[in-house]
Amino acid sequence: MAELFSKIEIFFKNNFMIDDRKKYALICDSVALVHLLFLVVFFVSGVTPLFVYNIFAVSMYLYCGFYLSKHEKFATVFILTIIEVIFHSAFATVLLGWNYGFMIYTIALIPVAFYMAFTIETITKSLQFSVLSSAFIFITYFVIIYYARHNNEVYHAGARLEGMFFYLNNMIAFAMSIFFSGLFIVEIINIQRNLRSENISLEEQANYDKLTHLLNRNAMAKYFDDAIILAERDNKDFCILMLDIDDFKKVNDTYGHDCGDEVLKTVARVISDDLRQGDAVFRWGGEEIVVLIRSDIKVATSVAHRICNHIAGTVTSHQNKNIRVTITIGVAAFVKGMTMDELIKQADVKLYYGKKHGKDQVVS
C-alpha cells in the first residue's frame, strides 16, 4: 500500500500535462460506455423508453468524443453533458423510482461542473455558469424527490435489478468524483508549477541583465542595503570595484556591435569566475560593471588586480578574429555614514583617474 501511494505521489509531482482534446474525448467515451451498459440492461429488462433514450445518449457522447472534442468545442461538450446527465437521472427516476439511485449522479455532477468550467477557456474566471448549473441541479434534485415521494414508479423491474442499479449507480458516481478530483489536483499542480516558472522568469527579467546575465542596477539596492546594515551594525567591511572596459568604443567601431556584445559577455564571465562566495557583480550600464566585495580594501584591491590580469590575458573569438581588451578598475571602501551613491561616486572618481593615467590598472 505504501508503494502504491508513493507511485501516486510521484505521478502528481511529475510534469504531467493534460491534453484537453484527449481528456474530453476520454470522458465522452467513458460516459458512452456507461450508457451502452444501461442500454443493454434496459433492453433485457424491457424498460423500452430508457432503452431508446440510451441509444440517443450513446450516439451523442460518441459524437462529442470523436467530433466536438477533436475540434475543441469543449464548452459545447460541457453543456451537453450537464443537460444529459440531469435529464437522464430525472427521467430514469420518474420511470423506475427513487430506490434505483439514478439521482446520485446529479450530486456528483456539481464538482464536475465546477471542474469543467475551471478548465474551459471560454468560461473560466467566471463562476456564473457553474453556480447557475449547480442551482439548476439542486432544484431538479428536490423536485424529483418531491415527485418520487408522491407518485409510484412507471416500471418495476424487480428487487434484484433495483439493488444492482442502486449499487452500480453509487459506485459510478463515486468514481466520477474521485476521477475529477484527481484531474483537478493535476490541473492545480500544473498551474502552480507554471506560476513558479513565470515568477522565476519575471525575477530574472527584473534583476538580471539579459546580455551578460549579471545582476542589474535594479538588484543593487538590496545587496548594498544589506552590506551597509552589516557594516554599520557588525563592523563587516565591504568595498566596491567600478570596472570599465578600455577603448570599448573602438571594439564596436572596428568589429561591430555583435563583437562588442561577445566581449562584454566574456568580461562578465571572467569577473564572475574570479569572485568569492558572498561577493556580487552587477552590470552598471554600457561597458561599466560594479563588483561588491565583502572584505576590506586590501582584499578588494587584490581581487581587482586578479580580475584585471585575467581580463588582459583572455581572448574573445568572434568570426575568426581574436580580440583582447583591458579594463581599468576603481576601488572604494565603505566608511560608516556613507550612502550607496557616495560610495559609487568615490569608486567612479578613482576609475576616472585610472583612465586618465594609462588605463589597464587598478586605482584604490
Image (cartoon, rainbow, N blue to C red):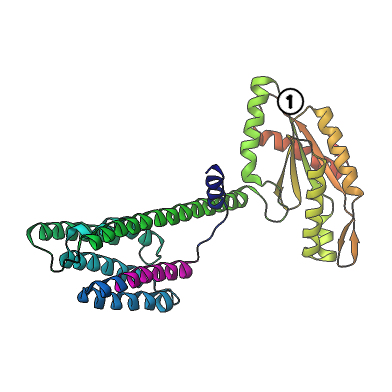
Main SS of the magenta part reads: helix
User: Is residue 360 visible in the rendered structure shown here?
Assistant: no
Q: Is residue 2 rendered magenta in the image?
A: no
When asked about the image quadrant of residue 308, the answer is: top right
Q: Residue at x 53, y 60 (%)?
A: 17
Q: Amino acid at mark 1?
A: Asp
Q: Which residue is mark 1?
A: 237
When asked about the image quadrant of residue 277, the answer is: top right
Question: Nearest the camera: 139 or 35?
Answer: 35
Q: Is residue 113 above or below residue 361?
A: below
Q: Position of residue 350 (x, y in %)?
A: 80, 37
Which span is picked out in magenta? 19-39
Q: Position of residue 314 (x, y in %)?
A: 89, 51
User: Is residue 281 visible in the rendered structure shown here?
Assistant: yes
Q: Position of residue 190 (x, y in %)?
A: 51, 55
Q: Residue at x 82, y 56 (%)?
A: 263
Secondary structure of the residue carrying tag 1 is: loop
Q: Residue at x 43, y 71 (%)?
A: 25
Question: Nearest the camera: 207 or 173?
Answer: 173
Q: Residues within 10 Å of mark 1 (few under 14, many from 20)?
A: some
Q: Residue at x 29, y 70 (%)?
A: 41
Q: Is residue 25 rendered magenta in the image?
A: yes
Question: Nearest the camera: 197 or 66?
Answer: 66
Q: Position of residue 270 (x, y in %)?
A: 83, 47
